[in-house]
Amino acid sequence: MAVNTRSDASENWSIDDRCTNCDVARQLAPGLVREHAGRSELVRQPRDEAELRQLRAAAHACPTRSIRPGSGLLDPASDPFPLALDDGVLLLGHNSPRTAGANSYLCRRSTGWVMVDTPRYSEPLAARYAALGPVTDVLLTHRDHARHGRAWADRLGARLWIHEGDLAAAPAADRVLRGTDPVEISPGLVAHPFPGHTLGSVLFVADERYCFSGDSLYWSRTTGDVEVQEAVTWYSIEEQAASLERSLGVLRFEWLLPGHGDRRRMSVEEADRRLRSLAERARRLRPAPVDFTAVRW
């Protein structure tokens, strides 16, 4: 199919130097965008409508709005979000620079939706997501992703959750998780405190199917495996290893849905095997200075 000739025609696209290397564009348009010199760059222009849709998705998700057509203006009608990943999960896009460009999700529950971390906040965007149906809870995986939590919870009439270890980032939260034991938030939805990346990091697992892992776990394209972001562990890599040990045989899921890094679907058995292997590797990790360039996306 020929690429259209509107203002976002393929030959006009570019990525500017405001990119913060959050990785979201490479997740959404992997054949068109690559990492180079600490930021994303365009490999080539899209060749067909399918690739153009990928690049538009990357542009609407980009937290710095670095991906642009030649006109400099994105067509609102080309916004694909929310983007269905499965029958039960939507990727929200519109990543925010105030949450380090993290991904956010809506997960379908019997009583409506729960939001895990948040996109940037604006009233038009809030109206769009509110129209999908009731949102009962906004779940924050950790402090780095908390910036818009209160605004989204208030707009949607939802309860805001965070762990006590990161409460300073959302002091007006409605529900505070404590300790390291798993907590059932609602039937089938379990919070697994996971200190390491931050003191108050949490994984949220729905129906032993979807694991929303924040910045604690992610799928690495470089290693082809589940990894921890040891190069950007703010609290304690030893605690991260301890959290992994506690999770073995307890944490069960099919979808790994992180804030940063790639998403991955696998069998419960494969996820368990990869977590056990990661736990073994994590035992050998030692504290090191934070180094964003060492993250193995």
Image: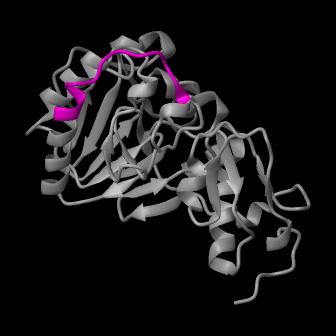
User: Which residue occupies the extreme left position in the image?
Assistant: 249
Q: In the shown orientation, is residue 88 left or right of residue 53?
A: left
> Which residue is more in the foreground, 159 or 104?
104
Classify residue 154 by image quadrant. Answer: top right
The location of residue 187, given as percent across then percent down, is 19, 42
On screen, 153 above or below 104? above
Q: Which residues are magenta?
A: 280-292
> Which residue is more in the foreground, 127 or 296?
296
The location of residue 199, given as percent across then percent down, is 35, 14
Classify residue 277 by image quadrant. Answer: top left
Work out whether residue 191 can be spotted. yes
- Give the quadrant of the N terminus: bottom right
* Residue at x 48% of width, y 40% of height: 260
Work out whether residue 128 can be spotted. no
The location of residue 218, given as percent across then percent down, is 37, 43
Magenta stretch, overall SS: loop
User: Which residue occupies the extreme right position in the image?
Assistant: 71
The location of residue 24, given as percent across then percent down, is 57, 48
On screen, 223 above or below 203? below
Residue 288 counted in the magenta span: yes
> Which residue is more in the foreground, 251 or 82?
251
